């Protein structure tokens, strides 16, 4: 079995927590907001970068500026077997990014590394390929690392969290706003975020209320990085 890079025992959440996680009561949502559920004990908080490491990442001032666009539970809940994660990124000139997913047994499910060159500030969309099919109702761990020193992984800039595929029936009908609200009310982050994102211009107030419900309103005018 493999542990997340530079992780600690508090982050290693076994299969025993999966049933607990599904059964936890949800936090009431505001109208037009998102209904989150508490994370299991020991789940990593959603932090900006690797916490207490100030200064440069190599020669670039990007420490503590990488942030996952997730609700307070720091969990990407989705109906997709190959989900998408959205990360707020600082401008980066030349760095390597590694993204990895581990299953409930801490086995590596997926890992990829790619270069970020002359990347502007914005939201980075990280898509898991179709050949990856996450097991339903199972807690997965994800981690993103920016390589600050190829010879010393201990100084990498890192964020991490949880990922869970849930089996929720799609809405039977309705407008795009109805569908976004449906997923928000059912605590399905990816599909709710993507639904409201598509409506951010035509239904500006609904987009703002969605972000405010999870304290992400400062990203209301963020742009997606191509």
Image (cartoon, rainbow, N blue to C red):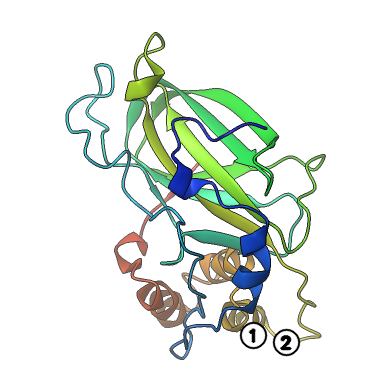
Q: Residue furthest top?
A: 151
The vertical placement of 58 against 73, above or below, is above
| Front-lying residue, 215 or 207 | 215
Q: Circle 2 sits on which residue?
A: 174
Residue 226 seen in the current view? no
Q: Circle 1 sits on which residue?
A: 178
Dot 2: what SS? loop
> On the picture, is 203 further left or further right than 93?
right
Q: Given contact means CB atoms under 8 Å apart, are the residues at marks 1 and 2 in contact?
A: yes
Q: Residues within 10 Å of mark 1 (few under 14, many from 20)?
A: some
Residue 10 seen in the current view? yes
Q: Which mark is residue 218?
A: none
Image-quadrant location for residue 60:
top left
**At 78% from the left edge and 54% from the top edge, which residue is drawn?**
135
Dot 1: what SS? helix
**At 35% from the left edge and 42% from the top edge, which residue is drawn?**
66
């Amino acid at each position: 079995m493999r542990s997340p890079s530079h992780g600690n025992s508090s982050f290693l959440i076994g299969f025993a927590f999966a049933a607990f996680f599904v059964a936890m009561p949800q936090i009431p949502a505001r109208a037009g907001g998102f209904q989150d559920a508490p994370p299991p004990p020991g789940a990593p908080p959603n932090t900006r970068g690797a916490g207490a490491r100030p200064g440069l990442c190599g020669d670039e001032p990007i420490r503590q500026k990488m942030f996952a666009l997730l609700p307070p539970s720091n969990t990407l809940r989705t109906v997709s077997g190959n989900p998408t994660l959205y990360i707020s990124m600082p401008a980066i000139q030349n760095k390597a990014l590694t993204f990895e997913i581990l299953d409930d047994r801490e086995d590596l499910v997926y890992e990829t590394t790619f270069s970020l060159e002359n990347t502007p500030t914005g939201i980075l969309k990280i898509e898991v390929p179709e050949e990856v099919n996450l097991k339903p109702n199972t807690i997965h761990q994800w981690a993103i690392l920016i390589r600050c020193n190829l010879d010393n992984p201990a100084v990498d800039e890192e964020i991490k969290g949880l990922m869970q595929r849930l089996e929720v029936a799609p809405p039977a009908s309705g407008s795009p706003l109805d569908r976004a609200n449906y997923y928000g009310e059912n605590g399905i982050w990816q599909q709710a975020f993507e639904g409201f994102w598509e409506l951010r211009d035509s239904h500006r107030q609904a987009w703002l209320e969605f972000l405010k419900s999870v304290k992400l309103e400062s990203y209301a005018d963020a742009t997606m990085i191509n």
